[in-house]
Image (cartoon, rainbow, N blue to C red):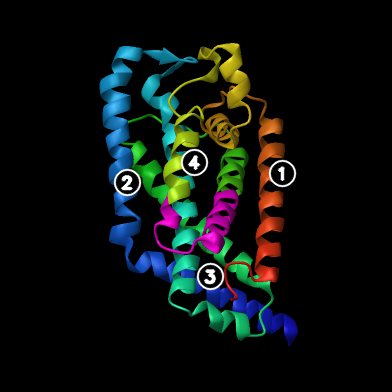
């Protein structure tokens, strides 16, 4: 009976989260597709034709995995931070807190919703990319695994932001001042082999570098970093954030007055 109750609670949260972003698909799925199409046109077609080849690939093909990953990162993060903070702001988070639902189930439900949106947007952007590039998946397992780990990691990041946010402005600070710089400095538009050694060392502490390069390896078969190292780093970051988020929920930080 307990397991059935927990399963129903988990499925309810997941269905709510998926329904939430699919109901307003014009706002959640179409804008990323348009934005990424502009990246392909400007950086790929216009600028890329002047840059030429990179690591044996046309520039537009080289940056395509990074652009897809960028959309996955932004949307998995945005889904959780906006949904959980909205629940706090509208006070219906209290309904889950008083219900006999373990905090672990609540956390897993929100993460699953973020992962679902990340995957769906990633698929939409990949379809858009096919109009501009000649993408071939080099390794399906690595490609799927990296998207999954990345979606989980940034869903947890969105939860962490939402827990501490006290007003709507707070949920835009991290994406603007932390997430965006990390993305643009994470090897989306270039190979870190082009950087001086000092900046390569600095880039090595950027978690997005590992995501982008591991996904690029899954799509194209090339990477600036060791794939095993990338998976280890992604797993470590995910476990650390998961533990932190669960502890915060258990303590009621940012939720209970």
Mark closer to the chain start, 2 or 1: 2
1 relative to 255, above or below = below
Residue that numbered label 3 is attached to: 14
Q: Quadrant of residue 143?
A: top right
Q: Is residue 234 left or right of residue 61?
A: right
Residue picked out by circle 2: 33
Q: Residue at x 69, y 76 (%)?
A: 102
Question: How far separated are the C-alphas under marks 4 and 1?
Answer: 20 Å
The residue to which callout 1 is attached is 236
Mark-to-mark CA distance, 4 and 3: 28 Å
Magenta stretch?
151-172
Q: Is residue 6 left or right of residue 175?
A: right
Label 4 secondary element: helix
Task: Give the alpha-carbon distance from disc 1 to disc 3, as whole Å.
Answer: 25 Å
Principal SS element in the magenta part? helix
> Where's the C terminus, which quadrant?
bottom right
Residue at image position (59%, 19%) is 200
Q: Is 182 placed above or below 153 here?
A: above
Disc 4: which residue: 178
Q: Is residue 53 left or right of residue 196?
A: left
Res 110 label: none
Does label 1 or label 3 sit earlier along the sequence?
3
Residue 219 highlighted magenta (yes or no):
no
């Amino acid at each position: 009976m307990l397991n059935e109750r927990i399963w129903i609670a988990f499925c309810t949260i997941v269905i709510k989260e998926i329904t939430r972003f699919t109901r307003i698909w014009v706002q959640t799925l179409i804008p990323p597709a348009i934005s990424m199409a502009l990246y392909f046109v400007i950086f790929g077609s216009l600028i890329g034709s002047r840059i030429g080849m990179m690591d044996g690939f046309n520039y537009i093909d080289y940056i395509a995995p990074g652009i897809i990953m960028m959309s996955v990162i932004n949307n998995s993060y945005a889904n959780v931070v906006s949904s959980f903070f909205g629940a706090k702001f509208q006070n219906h988070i209290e309904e889950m807190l008083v219900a006999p639902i373990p905090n672990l189930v609540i956390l897993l439900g929100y993460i699953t919703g973020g992962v679902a949106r990340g995957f769906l947007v990633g698929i939409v952007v990949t379809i858009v990319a096919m109009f501009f590039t000649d993408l071939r998946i080099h390794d399906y397992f690595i490609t799927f695994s990296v998207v999954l780990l990345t979606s989980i990691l940034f869903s947890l990041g969105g939860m962490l932001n939402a827990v501490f946010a006290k007003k709507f402005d707070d949920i835009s600070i991290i994406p603007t001042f932390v997430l965006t710089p990390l993305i643009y400095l994470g090897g989306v538009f270039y190979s870190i082999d082009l950087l001086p050694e000092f900046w390569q060392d600095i880039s090595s502490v950027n978690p997005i570098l590992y995501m982008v390069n591991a996904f690029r390896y899954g799509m194209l078969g090339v990477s600036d970093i060791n794939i095993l190292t990338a998976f280890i780093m992604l797993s470590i970051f995910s476990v650390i954030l998961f533990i932190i988020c669960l502890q915060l929920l258990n303590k009621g930080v940012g939720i209970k007055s």
